[in-house]
Image (cartoon, helix red, strand yellow):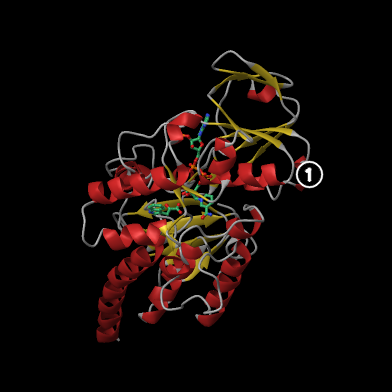
């Protein structure tokens, strides 16, 4: 063993990650009288929001469904807060609950010791032993870099959306955006507005919905309708509204899946694109849609229809993945949920042996509050019975 390593026993839960999920978990525990410790690998909280997002990013769901437990967004915030407003809110949130993460602690392994009934965490610097472990490292911890033939041979600029800030440096460039999720669509529009010549790779059918219907958030409207109508009826309504506002997306080469947008979100976790203007540019041909890529060449790409194009820049908008399998022992424990076989954590907040997760429900910020409350309730119950027991012994 490394003689310099220091080991700490943590009486309450250890939370891995100081993003929205970790902060929400710490706040909910604190409200129930349970102390916790957050370990964060970066040197600040919400590092993904601060460093891995583009400048124009705004929440695409209304603020009232995105807020963390107990503290509302400031009243003067707009319906869709900007990323800077969201970060300011998170900083204030941590201050409000006196949450003080231990920064620069990258958890390299977490192992359960059955004889001690404890989790042993090893970071780059220390070891921590705890009874409860809360995984709050999120679904977007690492960029997904697809293995497309020839990708390493492409000699021009290649980046992932996680390092894209704005389109200023791409003016006049021929840019290919690979991937048509919310990141790909918003960045394509940003590039277009900055004078780039943009193509977007759409390899499969997908749902595009207007971000707002009749001046109200499509998402909020859906949730309201779901109080009275089943999912398939609300989906029909959403598709009708999309048809009326966006037109027939098939005409642009973007087909609609057989399954409705909310049914798809619920069954496989795929978020519909909430369109904020990119689709109009696709419709007018100002942003070009291309099919899958066959291979990259040194100067461009060959597409599945056989056409070859020269490109200045390729932006991979191919999404993100969690990193839990790389440090959490038997993360496969959790691999028992239906629907997302490749996902390491369950669509569920409670695992075995005192391990919990917050923010792994593919619901963006929506799932965070609910998970944080449930996890904190469950741990607080055990915490109380543990402390009662200790008092009895002393
Ligand atoms: N304003 C906001 O609030 C925003 C929110 N978000 C959210 O952040 C999360 C991440 O979004 P995003 O970064 O868009 O990632 P997503 O995982 O949502 O989308 C990735 C896209 O890349 C495509 N893709 C993956 N591999 C390839 C490949 N080899 N060739 C072609 N296409 C490929 C996928 O296609 P396929 O479906 O066929 O696999 C999919 O369309 C989502 O939940 C999203 O809703 C993102 C941006 C803005
Ligand atoms: O922002 C995200 O990534 C989300 O997943 C948010 C979200 C959860 N459920 C939805 C249903 C329709 C549109 C967006 C969402």
Q: Which residue is mark 1?
A: 169
Camera sees residue 99? no
Location of residue 134 (image quadrant): bottom left
Q: Is residue 81 above or below residue 97?
A: above
Q: 104 and 45: which one is in front?
A: 45
Q: Residue at x 34, y 45 (%)?
A: 240
Report x, y in % for residue 316: 61, 36
In the rendered view, would you say 160 is above or below 152? below
Q: Nearer the viewer, residue 62 or 17?
A: 62
Q: Residue furthest top?
A: 306
Residue 346 left/right relative to 205: left
Q: Position of residue 364 (x, y in %)?
A: 44, 56
Disc 1 CB within 8 Å of nearest ligand 1 atom: no
Which of the two residues, 374 or 316, is positioned nearer the viewer here? 316
Asked if residue 387 shows in the view, the reply is: yes
> Residue drawn 34% across and 41% down?
268
Question: Is the residue marked by circle 1 packed among few (<14), some (14-19), or many (20+) residues within 10 Å?
Answer: few
Q: Quadrant of residue 313?
A: top right
Q: Secondary structure at mark 1?
A: helix
Q: Nearer the viewer, residue 88 or 8?
A: 88
Quadrant of the rendering where the C terminus is positioned = bottom left
In the image: residue 127, left or right of residue 117 = right
Q: Which residue appears at 59% of the width and 67% of the height? A: 87
Q: Which residue shows up at 49% across the image and 46% down it?
A: 323
Q: Position of residue 255 (x, y in %)?
A: 42, 31
Image location (x, y in percent) of residue 230: 21, 52
Is 260 above or below relative to 109?
Answer: above
């Amino acid at each position: 063993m490394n003689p310099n390593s220091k080991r700490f026993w943590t009486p309450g839960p250890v939370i891995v990650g100081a993003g929205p999920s970790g902060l929400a978990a710490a706040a909910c525990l604190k409200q129930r009288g349970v102390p916790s410790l957050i370990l964060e690998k970066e040197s600040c909280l919400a590092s993904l929001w601060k460093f891995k997002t583009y400048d124009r990013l705004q929440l695409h769901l209304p603020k009232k469904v995105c807020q963390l437990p107990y503290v509302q967004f400031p009243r003067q915030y707009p319906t869709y807060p900007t990323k800077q407003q969201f970060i300011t809110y998170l900083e204030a949130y941590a201050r409000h609950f006196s949450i003080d993460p231990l920064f620069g602690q990258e958890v390299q392994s977490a192992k359960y010791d059955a004889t001690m009934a404890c989790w042993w965490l090893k970071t780059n610097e220390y070891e921590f032993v705890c009874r409860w472990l809360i995984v709050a490292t999120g679904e977007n911890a690492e960029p997904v870099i697809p293995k497309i033939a020839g990708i390493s041979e492409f000699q021009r600029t290649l980046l992932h959306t996680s390092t894209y800030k704005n389109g200023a440096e791409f003016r006049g460039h021929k840019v290919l955006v690979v991937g048509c999720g919310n990141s790909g669509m918003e960045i394509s529009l940003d590039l277009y507005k900055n004078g780039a010549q943009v193509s977007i790779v759409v390899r499969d059918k997908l749902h595009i919905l207007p971000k707002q219907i009749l001046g109200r958030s499509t998402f909020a409207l859906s949730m309201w309708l779901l109080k009275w109508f089943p999912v398939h009826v609300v989906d029909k309504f959403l598709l009708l509204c999309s048809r009326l506002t966006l037109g027939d997306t098939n005409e642009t080469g973007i087909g609609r899946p057989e399954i409705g947008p909310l049914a798809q979100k619920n069954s496989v976790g795929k978020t519909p694109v909430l369109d904020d203007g990119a689709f109009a540019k696709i419709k007018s041909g100002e942003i070009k849609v291309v099919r899958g890529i066959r291979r990259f060449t040194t100067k461009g790409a060959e597409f599945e229809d056989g056409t070859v194009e020269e490109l200045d820049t390729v932006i991979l908008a191919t999404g993100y993945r969690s990193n839990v399998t790389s440090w959490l022992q038997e993360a496969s424990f959790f691999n028992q949920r239906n629907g997302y076989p490749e996902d390491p954590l369950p669509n569920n907040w409670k695992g075995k042996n005192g391990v919990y997760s917050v923010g792994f429900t593919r619901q963006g910020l929506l799932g965070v509050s609910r998970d944080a409350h449930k996890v904190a309730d469950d741990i607080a119950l055990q915490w109380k019975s543990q402390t009662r027991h200790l008092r009895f012994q002393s």
